[in-house]
Image (spheres, rainbow, N blue to C red):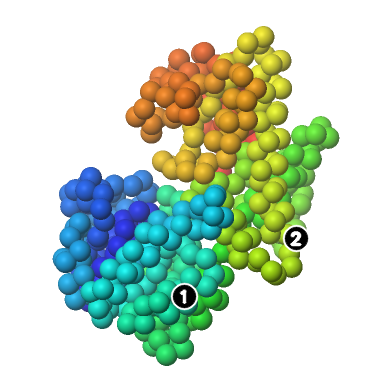
Amino acid sequence: MNITVVGIGYVGLSLAVMLSSKHRVTALDTNLARLELLKKRISPLRDDGIETWMAEKSLDLYPTASLDEAYRDPEFVILAVPTNYDEKTHHFDTSILDSVLDELQRRECKATVVIKSTIPVGYTEEAARKRPNLTLLFSPEFLRESKALEDNLHPSRIVVGSKEENREEAKRFADLLASCAEKADVPVLLTGYEEAEAIKLFANTYLALRVAYFNELDTYAIYRGLDTKSIVEGVCLDPRIGSFYNNPSFGYGGYCLPKDTKQLLQNFDYVPQNLIRAIVDSNATRKAAISKQIVSLAKKKAEKPVIGIYRLTMKSHSDNFRQSAILDVIEAIKEEGLEIRIYEPTLQEETFLGLPVEKDLNRFKAECDIIAANRFTKDLLDVEDKVYTRDLFGRD
């Protein structure tokens, strides 16, 4: 089968790599540096399994920047392009996705077009109405950062949304994903467009709710002088709650949770709600509370304290710090006029947000009076007395 994947970010790359072990896959992107790496079978993005998979498997994978090459008679065109949340419009920015769909419409594409990008509820229906010649499906992704290939190979479920008359195509695409997965008997759910879109946003908003819940539990314990870990362990021994996704942090962040929760809130518009708004607000409150704690402790350490930010990334084994909670913490500390230094080995720049970036970890640890770390690592063991973290379990 000939398949084209448009966009080789985390979602598109993992899909293209997985599918190309059994099918001919053309990977289309405008980022020439990424394409060159992929041609050499080097992963352009950090993912725990992709590099190994490409080394071990014989892949029928063809990276390209050519539209003519990419759209030359595929059976499926999978769209995995960015749809970032626009804080001004309070809506996902679907402009890149719109332009790709317009191009496919102009080319009178006969392939089944599958949207993998995260979108607002109602988008696919409107896109199909505007482009009646396209056969459109929406299939949400449920991928963890740095574990995208693993989650495609061992999916929790496969969801495909379609019009009723395209249900057979939806089943074909679901079967395609299932046949390339390593996990057997993957649950498959075929729904309408809006149901599939809502599944994605509500799933991520529930994860954000869980993060926010344990963060608020931790904030309560901090202000009352209680042992957070004991409370969390006691709460999570209830099997209905479970001991997972319960490690306090500076706030939820990353590719999906901030934008998906805000988009879902906007999709409620005329629908009565309190909880969804509270999840979004809770995250902002948590980051403000953490910032105050760091500033207070720093001022106790020195008259003119130097505050170190250890890593901008959300968690270990990641090179992503888009929408990372620590960014808002940094901005809050900056408003206090305190000196800040950043240690982030993935940064090439000498400064970030106007702040110096220290490349030498030992010098960074020596020069800082207090070090804020969303996640604690063994690199900080020798300066543990300087570290401020809410990482209780060393995971998540």
Q: Secondary structure at mark 1?
A: helix
Which residue extends farthest right? Answer: 224
Q: Who is closer to the viewer here, 31 or 226?
A: 31
At 52% from the left and 13% from the top, the residue drawn is 367
Left or right of residue 227, residue 263 in this image = left
Left or right of residue 304, residue 136 in this image = left
Q: Quadrant of residue 175?
A: bottom left
1 up-or-down from 391: above or below: below
At 28% from the left and 68% from the top, the residue drawn is 103
- In percent of width and height, residue 3 lies at 25, 71
Left or right of residue 245, residue 130 in this image = left
As measured in the structure, the alpha-carbon distance from the residue carrying label 2 to the one carrying label 1 is 28 Å
Q: Which mark is residue 274?
A: 2
At 51% from the left and 47% from the top, the residue drawn is 254
Three-letter code for the amino acid on which mark 2 is drawn:
Asn
Inspect this view and state whether residue 214 appears: no
Q: Quadrant of residue 114?
A: bottom left
Residue holding disc 1: 126
Three-letter code for the amino acid on which mark 1 is drawn:
Glu
Q: Secondary structure at mark 2?
A: loop
Q: Who is closer to the viewer here, 387 or 335?
A: 335
302 up-or-down from 274: above or below: above
